[in-house]
Image (spheres, rainbow, N blue to C red):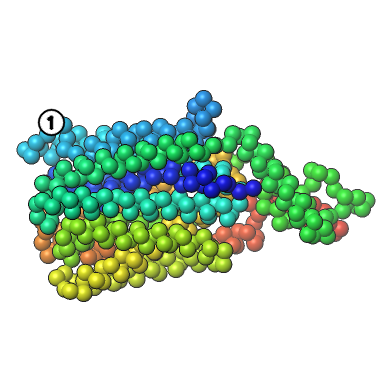
């Protein structure tokens, strides 16, 4: 029996707080620190890099501890760490979009940097604890591939809705204030404060729903569920294909401890738990890390630099930093609805390549847009649609393939997700810091506009191509391994003169 609708819904909202904060973090942090607090390009980039490094370090550590222990009063190991992360985010995120306590316009930048760095570290560490434990719940709650895809789609649907909410709130707040110039300035600090308070309160509400509605299985319950799935598979397959039962030399039916069916994915002989160190022996682990890193780079870099591309390259008013990302995520929401039915007819790899092609098309189109042209305001909306569809498709498919990689090895699931997230955080932080340091000017000049044009066109587009190549390598080598080398314990059953080999 699959998960109930309310269980899927409760699980889906468990990452809303993270999604709301991440949307503001990637879309507006650099804008806020550079244009409102007047940090230099490099200083703002280093602040974001500090957060990404903290996140990257915390992620595998929290993942390892979550796999090993952390069950508070039988609350569940994943939910316990999720709760710790949620509290950390709620306490540390709002001050990031406010002027530091006791600071004024004349406070040195280094003093403000020292003030914000601890807040960034606490926020990113808490964010990591929430993220990887929410992801690690997917293999534990889902019983088959379709359910995993469904949970990933629901999860990302709420990610999209969360981003839509952030941009709607931003649009309304800026529109209602109606003060200042069309461009961002120091006068907009109160608007950012209102936005972050609304966002944090909303995320807190949905986190409560998650912790009330989701019941995490204990180790014994997960063991019983896996055994039940194995038994059901054996019965069903035996009824449909009784000829698959093999006999021994005396012509008798094998006993209950014998692995009968090659088509059973999770054999009862696969009882020994996989250690976290075993993942380093699997090439698919490194290939998936590259694919996940490229996917996240495409999603995050496009989200970080689309506001700057709009304001500095196309010279559009500040309301567009809410409108265009809003269109991107509405398109992304449509994509989440389509991915589940499409995945029944096409392989995840094929759907990923389609999404990568859409992203590449959006990058090429954005490179040739010019400021102050009448067609620009129209074309940017079409680019937003392509970008929204493409980034959503590649992320949902990548997460689904990652869930399949983990499979039934849920005892090390958090470590895998944590390791993938480590590559994501470090690569994003380094990439943004490098881009910020390469920014050729410190004002809204033509060179700055051309710089962000190159970032959206060449940088994001090139990473999308690399991600597609990484996917092809992963798909090819995985297929080769499936055909040639069984993974895990190999179980052999005699069938006359032949051996039947089953992958545990």
Q: Establish if 204 lies above or below 356.
A: above
Depth order, front residue of 279/365: 365
Q: Is mark 1 on a helix, strand or loop?
A: loop
Q: In which quarter of the image is residue 294?
A: bottom left
Q: Is residue 232 left or right of residue 369?
A: right
What residue occupies the far top of the structure in this picture?
73
Q: In which quarter of the image is residue 309?
A: bottom left
Question: What residue sits right under mark 1 in the picture?
Answer: 102
Depth order, front residue of 57/344: 344
Residue 131 position, x and y percent, is 42, 43
Q: Which residue is drawn at 43% across and 53% down?
A: 156
Q: Which residue is drawn at 82% across and 55% down?
A: 245
Q: In this view, does 486 lie to the left or right of 95?
A: right
The reply to whether residue 13 is visible in this rendering is yes
Q: Is residue 479 left or right of residue 257?
A: left
Q: Residue at x 28, y 48 (%)?
A: 24
Q: How crowded is mark 1: few (under 14 residues within 10 Å), some or many (20 or more)?
A: few
Residue 365 position, x and y percent, is 29, 72
What residue occupies the far front of the structure in this picture?
176
The reply to whether residue 427 is visible in this rendering is no
Residue 399 position, x and y percent, is 47, 53
Query: How many marks are shown on the rendered structure?
Result: 1
Q: Which residue is drawn at 60% across and 59% down?
A: 481
Depth order, front residue of 320/48: 320
Residue 135 position, x and y percent, is 48, 45
């Amino acid at each position: 029996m699959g998960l109930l609708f309310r269980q899927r819904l409760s699980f889906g909202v468990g990452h809303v707080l993270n999604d709301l904060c991440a949307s503001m973090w990637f879309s507006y942090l650099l804008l806020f620190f550079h244009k409102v607090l007047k940090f230099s390009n490099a200083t703002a980039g280093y602040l974001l890099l500090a957060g990404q490094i903290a996140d990257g370090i915390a992620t595998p550590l929290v993942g390892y501890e979550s796999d090993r222990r952390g069950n508070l009063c039988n609350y569940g190991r994943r939910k316990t760490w999720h709760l710790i992360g949620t509290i950390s985010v709620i306490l540390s995120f709002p001050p990031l979009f406010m002027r530091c306590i006791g600071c004024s316009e004349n406070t040195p930048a280094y003093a403000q940097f020292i003030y914000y760095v601890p807040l960034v570290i606490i926020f990113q560490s808490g964010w990591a604890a929430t993220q990887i434990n929410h992801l690690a719940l997917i293999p534990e709650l889902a019983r088959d591939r379709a359910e995993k895809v469904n949970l990933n789609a629901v999860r990302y649907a709420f990610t999209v809705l969360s981003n839509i909410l952030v941009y709607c709130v931003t649009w309304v707040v800026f529109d209602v204030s109606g003060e200042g110039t069309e461009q961002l300035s120091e006068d907009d600090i109160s608007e950012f404060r209102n936005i972050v308070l609304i966002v944090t309160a909303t995320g807190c509400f949905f986190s409560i729903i998650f912790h009330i509605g989701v019941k995490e299985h204990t180790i014994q319950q997960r063991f019983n569920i896996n055994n039940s799935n194995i038994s059901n598979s054996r019965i069903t397959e035996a009824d449909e294909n009784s000829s698959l039962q093999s006999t021994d030399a005396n012509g008798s039916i094998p006993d209950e401890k014998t692995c009968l069916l090659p088509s059973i994915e999770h054999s009862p002989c696969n009882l020994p738990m996989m250690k976290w160190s075993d993942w380093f022996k699997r090439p698919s682990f490194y290939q998936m890390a590259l694919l996940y890193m490229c996917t996240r780079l495409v999603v995050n870099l496009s989200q970080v630099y689309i506001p700057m591309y709009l304001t500095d390259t196309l010279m559009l008013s500040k309301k567009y930093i809410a409108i265009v990302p809003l269109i991107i995520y509405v398109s992304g929401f449509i994509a989440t609805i389509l991915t589940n039915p499409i995945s029944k007819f096409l392989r995840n790899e094929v759907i990923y390549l389609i999404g990568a092609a859409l992203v590449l098309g959006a990058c090429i189109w954005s490179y040739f847009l010019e400021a102050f042209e009448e067609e620009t305001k129209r074309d940017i909306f079409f680019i937003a649609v392509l970008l929204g569809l493409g980034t959503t498709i590649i992320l949902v498919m990548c997460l689904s393939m990652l869930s399949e990689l983990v499979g039934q090895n849920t005892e090390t699931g958090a470590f895998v997700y944590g390791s993938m997230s480590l590559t994501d955080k470090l690569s994003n932080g380094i990439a943004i810091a490098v881009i910020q340091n390469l920014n050729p000017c410190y004002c809204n000049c033509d060179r700055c506009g051309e710089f962000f044009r190159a970032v959206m066109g060449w940088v994001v587009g090139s990473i999308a191509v690399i991600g597609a190549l990484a996917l092809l390598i992963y798909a090819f080598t995985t297929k080769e391994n499936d055909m040639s080398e069984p993974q895990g314990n190999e179980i052999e059953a005699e069938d006359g003169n032949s051996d039947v080999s089953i992958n545990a």
